[in-house]
Image: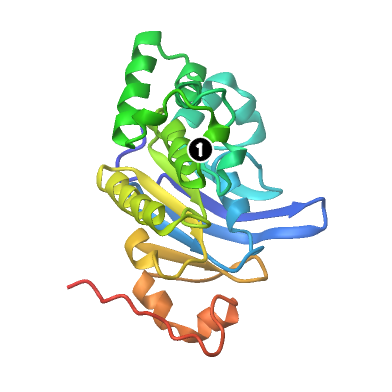
Amino acid sequence: MPSAADPVYVVEDVSYTYLDRFPALTDVSLRVARSEKLALLGANGCGKSTLLKILDGLLVPDRGTVMAFGEAVTEDALEDEQFNHGFRSRIGFIFQNSDAQVFSPTVREEIAFGPLNLGMPTEQIVERVDDTLTMLDIADLADRAPYQLSGGEKKRVAIASVLAMNPEVLLFDEPTAALDPRTQQWLIELIVELNAAGKTIVLATHDLETIDVLADRCLVFGEDHRIAGEGTPHEILADRDLMLSVNLIHERTHLHHPHPPR
């Protein structure tokens, strides 16, 4: 049995190419510890979202290995119903675009969709849905159709639909992108709270303003689809040459340095 000290993910020498000719990841290796907050940083198109999809089992790498919870994640394993069910129940993916994620006739049905697919008893599903609606303060939206919601409300519903399954790992793709400031602040606080409750967080972002709050550790991806650097948010933001080389800042950018922890 894997122990609590074992990493959630071990990724070794993973490469992935779209349509056999557009490299998205090249020889990427990383570990994700339990209950850590890991930020994948890099310019658009460097492979961050592809890596999240591989961690979620939506894509299988062309080369290299992915271990999750001590087991190999392969095409064959994902086709095995028992493995797939266990794997899916432990990982939640919040897409950048909520429209890609929210598709049920009402918000209540949207949140019930995951637990229903996991085969939970009806009473438990009703309880989960009610708890999640309350927790995210969206009970008043329960009977609305997704198309009647604002962007911020849709984001909350997309997150609720994932949290209803109570996964151990949460993958966020550009969590704060295109959100109004109030929803952005709410989401940052929620991610910190979920992590404090023991959830492992992996997020892809190029928003440097929030990484000192949202991450304990950063992996920086270069435009060659490889990992170009690793460190705490403070170390990464202080490495101006690295940030320039991966196109995350311009020559004239003044970086806000988070205060080192006291």
Q: Is residue 179 above or below residue 3?
A: below
Quadrant of image for the C terminus: bottom left
Residue in the image at 38% along x and 50% along y: 187
| Apparent side of residue 131 relative to residue 178 in the rendered image (left or right) | left
Looking at the image, which residue sits at the far front? 148
Which residue is more in the foreground, 178 or 53? 178
Q: Quadrant of residue 231?
A: bottom left
Percent across and percent down for residue 155 are 48, 43
Percent across and percent down for residue 200 are 37, 46
Q: Is residue 58 something that shows in the picture? A: yes
Percent across and percent down for residue 124 are 34, 14
Looking at the image, which residue sits at the far top? 122
Label 1, secondary structure: give it. Answer: loop
Which residue is more in the foreground, 164 or 89? 164
Q: Is residue 69 something that shows in the picture? A: no
User: Mark 1 belongs to which amino acid?
Assistant: Leu
Looking at the image, which residue sits at the far left? 262
| Apparent side of residue 13 relative to residue 110 in the rendered image (left or right) | right
Q: Which residue is mark 1?
A: 149
Looking at the image, which residue sits at the far bottom? 252
Residue in the image at 52% along x and 19% along y: 117
Q: Is residue 236 above or below residue 1?
A: below
